[in-house]
Amino acid sequence: MIACLVQDPIAVDDLIRRVSRPSCGGIGVFVGVVREPNLGHRTLHIDYHAYPEMAEKVMAEIATEVKARWEVEEVAIVHRIGRLGVGEASVAIVVSAPHRQAALDGASYAIEELKKRVPMWKKETFEGGQVWIEGDTAAW
Amino acid sequence: MKVRVRLFASYREAAGKEWLEEELPAGACVRDLLEAVHARHGLAAGPGRALVARNLEYVGLDALLCEGDEVVLLPPLGGGGA
């Protein structure tokens, strides 16, 4: 299981390699990226802030839940913190499983739970200002 | 009793510091703490807005606080991911 925060760009290929198992016929991948525009204005960059100790703990809990609820082999949940530009990956979830449905369902569950439970916030800088994206204002 | 409150993200920025020290009556709960922090610092617009964690676990509004507790005040989530 991989559940961690990183400062450097997320290497999705590397995660896929690390969760691959000979028994697995499917690998479900979700990658969240910084988009532009957001909320009607042009995003320049986003700064991701976490409560690191708790974020990694909750990410590990979510990965454990995926392994308990679906027939999956391995789960990787990696979130990047710091300043990211448009198009850069902020989060990657990679789930390997013998069969595709468990891989896809596990990855879907993980990203939804991550949004609800992992203490993580983003501050968006756009043309003309900055805003903390919190709660319902996070339109993604 | 004294409770130390650690701030993150927008709350830390608004307060201009990472830690607050709040004086609360004995027997106070998380809801009381949120009301005090809101009244004194203008953070967390009333109970239910912020999340509170202690020992890396979320705690509810009715959770009792103890002298010397260190709790973490977290802005609403939903900003993670992309």
Image: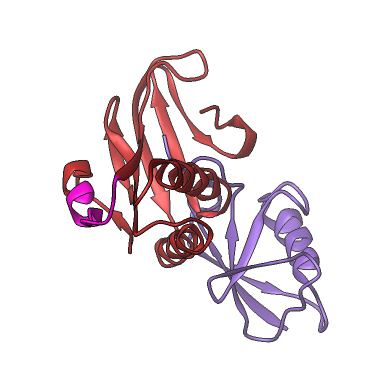
Chain colours: A red, B purple
- Viewer-nearest residue: A76 or A127: A76
Give how far across and how far down residue B37 sits, in percent: 70, 60
Give how far across and how far down residue B26 sits, in percent: 81, 84
Residue B71 drawn above or below residue A123: below
Q: Residue at x 43, y 45 (%)?
A: A107
Q: Quadrant of residue B34?
A: bottom right
Quadrant of the frame with the N terminus of chain B = bottom right
In magenta segment, residue A22: yes
Count of numbered circles in the view: 0
Q: Residue at x 67, y 53 (%)?
A: B50
Residue A13 drawn above or below residue A24: above
Give how far across and how far down residue B62 sits, in percent: 81, 69
- Viewer-nearest residue: A42 or A12: A12
Q: Is residue A40 visible?
A: yes
* Residue A1 shown left or right of residue B81 in the figure: left
Q: Is residue B13 visible?
A: no
Q: Quadrant of residue A53?
A: bottom left
- Viewer-nearest residue: B35 or A9: A9
Residue B32 drawn above or below residue A7: below
Give how far across and how far down residue A39 sits, in percent: 52, 18
Magenta region: which residues? A15-25
In magenta segment, residue A106: no
Quadrant of the frame with the C terminus of chain B = top left
